[in-house]
Image: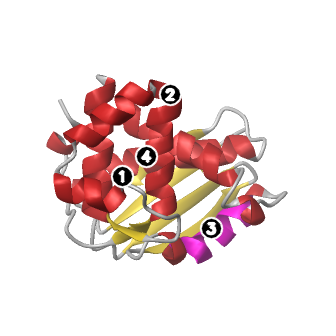
């Protein structure tokens, strides 16, 4: 069963930066191999392949194409879609925090999350992001007014946030969604905890 069959989604509005797409393609190459990358490309609809193949980090990609790409990756991997989305998010954070986003690294993880919320629209053109401190080792990220949303994207975001915590020396990271547009809420909220 795919996670999209469990909750609703809206794919037809919004864009993400190519840096996200590139990290997901790199995940396939590094974790699954060149044959899996070729299989992923050949399984994509021609319009999606044209959009994602050779995309530049600063180029915009439609949200719908990203979700189709990610679901194709899960199919090629032959694993549970939610697990693959989570792994894609973790890998994306690992790659991008050491390269493109390295300038955003902060010694204080709360500073990083506050800064990330302010920079949200530079990497996706939908939703408004807010970070709230919830304790010394807790925080909350809320995204509201998103024209597009998908359970696949939420699972990837949870993985991304877990890896961000780990990259800032947080241990036993836990990221759960306490509200989600895919479940009928008017926003998505991720509860962050670590030791």
Residue that numbered label 1 is attached to: 153
Q: Nearer the viewer, residue 36 or 65?
A: 36
Q: Is residue 20 above or below residue 91?
A: below
Q: Residue at x 27, y 53 (%)?
A: 49
Residue with the mark numbered 4: 156
Q: Which mark is first along the chain, 3 or 1?
A: 3
Q: In terms of sequence position, does the residue under pointer 2 or pointer 1 come before the other? A: 2
For residue 10, what is the image quadrant?
A: bottom left
Q: Quadrant of residue 184?
A: bottom left
Gap between marks 1 and 3 measured at Cα: 17 Å
Instruction: Name the mark nearer the viewer: 4 or 2.
Output: 2
Instruction: Please give the name of the residue rendered at 66% of the width and 32% of the height, measured from the top-left corner.
Output: 172
Which SS class for mark 1? Answer: helix
Query: Horizontal placement of 70 versus 93: left or right?
Result: left
Is there any visible trace of residue 175 in the rendered image?
Answer: no
Label 1 environment density (alpha carbons within 10 Å; few <14, some 14–19, many ≥20) = many
Q: Which portion, as a residue range, is magenta?
A: 110-120
Q: Which residue is mark 2?
A: 31
Q: Are marks 4 and 1 in contact (CB under 8 Å)?
A: yes
Which residue reaches farthest right? Answer: 107
Cα–Cα span, label 4 and label 2:
16 Å
In the rendered image, is residue 7 in sight? yes
């Amino acid at each position: 069963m795919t996670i999209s069959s469990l909750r609703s989604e809206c794919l037809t509005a919004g864009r993400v930066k190519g840096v996200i797409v590139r990290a997901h393609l790199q995940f396939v190459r590094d974790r699954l191999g060149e044959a899996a990358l070729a299989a992923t490309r050949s399984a994509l609809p021609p319009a999606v392949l044209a959009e994602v193949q050779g995309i530049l980090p600063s180029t915009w990609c439609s949200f719908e194409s990203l979700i189709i790409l990610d679901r194709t990756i899960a199919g090629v991997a032959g694993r549970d879609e939610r697990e693959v989305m989570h792994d894609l998010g973790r890998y994306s954070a690992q790659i991008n925090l050491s390269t493109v986003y390295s300038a955003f690294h902060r010694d204080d993880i709360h500073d990083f999350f506050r800064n990330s919320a302010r920079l949200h629209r530079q990497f996706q053109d939908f939703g408004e992001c807010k970070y709230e401190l919830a304790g010394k080792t807790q925080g909350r990220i809320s995204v509201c007014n998103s024209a597009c949303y998908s359970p696949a994207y939420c699972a990837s975001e949870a993985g991304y946030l877990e890896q961000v915590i780990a990259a800032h020396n947080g241990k036993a990271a836990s990221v759960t969604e306490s509200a989600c547009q895919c479940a009928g809420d008017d926003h998505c909220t991720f509860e962050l905890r670590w030791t």
